[in-house]
Image (spheres, helix red, strand yellow):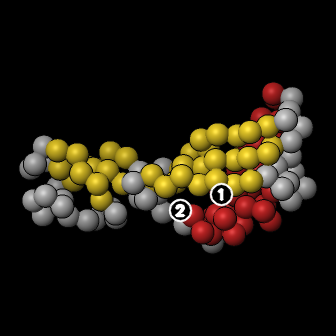
Amino acid sequence: MHEMAICESIRDILEEQAATQRFTRVERVKLAIGALSGVEAEAIRFGFDVAMAGSVADGARLEIEDVPGTAWCLPCAVSVTIAARYDACPKCGSHQLQVTGGSDMTIREVEVV
């Protein structure tokens, strides 16, 4: 389960930022998880509290924003929403799509004290 490693990386980032920016506690963490990122939101929710235990984010509230997958269809010359990387264009059925969004996961917001 690579999501646990992702949670541990989030914890490390928060700890580094706490030392740099001199905050002592994280109250809330908001993540944006793309539909095409390969990251399972439920697995992140499951591992978050365990990974944050004993850190500046111990007890922090986790919020997850789902980001849809988007792609540029070469034949249609339009941007379309897709659920998976190898989906066909919902307009013309072509598989000539270039992913343009929803392929990453980011820390969107952190509320600290």
Q: Is residue 25 above or below residue 103?
A: above
Q: Residue at x 62, y 69 (%)?
A: 43
What x and y, as percent, mark residue 56? 86, 46
Q: Which kind of residue does numbered mark 1 sit on?
A: Ile
- Residue 19 in view: no
Q: Position of residue 92 (x, y in %)?
A: 9, 59
Mark 1, Cα crowd under 10 Å, few <14 / some 14-19 / many 20+, is some
Q: Residue at x 70, y 47 (%)?
A: 29
Residue highlighted by disc 2: 39
Q: Secondary structure at mark 1?
A: helix
| Kind of residue sitting beneath label 2 | Val
Assign the N terminus to one quadrant of the image. bottom right
76 to the left or right of 107: left
Tell me whether circle 2 and circle 1 mark residues in contact (CB < 8 Å).
yes
Rendered view: 56 above or below 35: above
Count numbered badges in the picture.
2
The earlier-in-sequence mark between 2 and 1 is: 1
72 relative to 57 in the view: left or right: left
Residue placed furthest toward the top: 21
Residue drawn at x 39%, y 54% is 68
> Where residue 6 is drawn, which disc sits there?
1
Q: Quadrant of the C terminus?
A: top right
Residue sitting at 32 percent across and 45 percent down?
Answer: 100
The percent position of residue 70, horizontal first and vertical second, equals 32, 50
Foreground residue among 13 and 27: 27
Residue 10 in picture, x, y percent from top left: 70, 50
